[in-house]
Amino acid sequence: MTDAGTTDETGVRLELSAWTYRHLDRASKLLGVGLVALGLEMGGDTLTGVALGVVGAALALTTVFVRRQE
């Protein structure tokens, strides 16, 4: 865990305002859940279904790596 104001190993630091973060977080989660549901509808045992599920899960977790400005 790093202190506020420092960068990670790659030197990249992404911070968003609380308002922007909240809306980005909600949008990514909703879109991710939608893709997972679409993947299940296509068939959870097909390549297309699995690919949609993986992309949806990855999209839903993208905001984990973004910091909010405090």
Image: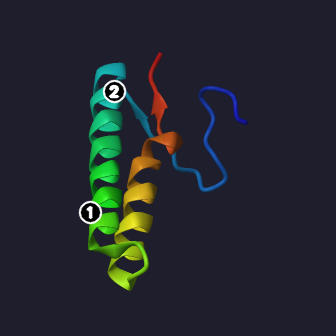
> Most extreme residue toward the right, as rendered?
1
Quote the CA–CA distance across marks 1 and 2.
24 Å
- Determine which quarter of the picture holds residue 50: bottom left
User: Which residue is painted at 35% across and 42% down in the image?
Assistant: 29
User: Which residue is painted at 40% across and 72% down in the image?
Assistant: 44
Residue 34: percent from the left, percent from the top? Answer: 27, 52
The answer to which of marks 1 and 2 sits earlier in the sequence is: 2
Residue 28: percent from the left, percent from the top? Answer: 32, 45
Residue 25: percent from the left, percent from the top? Answer: 36, 36
Q: What residue type is labelled 2?
A: Arg
Q: Nearer the viewer, residue 39 or 3?
A: 39
Residue 15: percent from the left, percent from the top? Answer: 43, 33
- Determine which quarter of the picture holds residue 20: top left
User: Which residue is painted at 43% across and 79% down in the image?
Assistant: 45
Residue ID for mark 2: 22
45 is higher (above) or lower (below) than 27? below
Where disc 2 sits, the SS reads helix
14 is higher (above) or lower (below) than 16? below
Q: What residue type is labelled 1?
A: Leu
Where disc 1 sits, the SS reads helix
Query: Left of 53 or right of it: where is 24?
Result: left
Query: Left of 68 or right of it: where is 24?
Result: left
How crowded pointer 1 is (Cα within 10 Å; few <14, some 14-19, many 20+) is rated as some
Q: Which of 66 and 64 is in front in this view?
A: 64
CB within 8 Å, label 1 to label 2 = no
Select label 1 or label 2 by which is in front. 1
